[in-house]
Image (tube, rainbow, N blue to C red):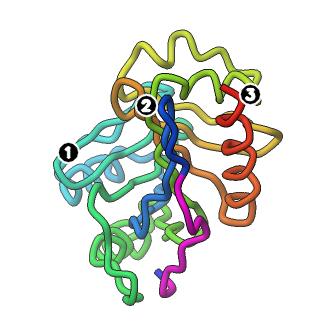
Amino acid sequence: MLNYNSVIKNEIKQESISVKEISPVIKINLRGKKREFLTNVGKNLNMILPTEANTSTTSDKLTAIWLSPDEWMIISNELASKDTNKSNLYEMLFNSISKTNLGAVIDVTDQFVQLELKGENVYEIFSAGSPFNFNEFKEKKGSTTQTVLNNTDIILHHKDENIVNLFVRRSFAEHLFNWIKDIASRL
């Protein structure tokens, strides 16, 4: 982590929706195919990586989001210190996975901004700017998808009823936040 600076300086608070940045949160990208990779990650994280498309697994401290058959994003469920460049989780995974050639471990904490959207109109906002059909997604807690929203690549994680975590690349975060704010004001 590189002395994390929040991109989003304010929140959206309306009757039917609220949007805020959750920061700083450790985000790690994992890639690997071997059985030893899955076993090693499972032991280190004390959780099983999801192997079914568009799903996630959650423990007390971590959430694992399926991105592809050999790729996952691991997100801390707890905030990290804003002034540190160290992540014990990253170092542990890097030493046991990357250094042993079982797979790749990349710290993407500064690459992705995490927004939390809450409220009854969350899916109306998504439908206004995404071609994805959210009917099944919103019914299944823990579901995930990679799609576009207002022509911006995003990752969505259905955290709970009417609560969705949205991950967007830092360079597009402010633009997407302002678009969400504009759409939310029209609902």
Q: Is residue 120 above or below residue 38?
A: above
Tag 2–tag 1 contact (CB < 8 Å): no
Main SS of residues in magenta: loop
Tag 3–tag 1 contact (CB < 8 Å): no
- Write down the region rendered in magenta: 2-11
* Residue ID for mark 3: 130
What amino acid does circle 3 point to?
Ser
Element carrying mark 1: loop
Provide residue 164's location: percent of width, then percent of height.
Answer: 46, 36
Closer-to-camera residue (176/2): 176
- Among numbered discs 2 and 1, the one appearing first in the sequence: 1
Provide residue 115's location: percent of width, then percent of height.
Answer: 52, 51
* Residue ID for mark 1: 59
Element carrying mark 3: loop
* Residue ID for mark 2: 158
What amino acid does circle 1 point to?
Ser
- Horizontal relation, residue 157 to residue 91: left or right: right
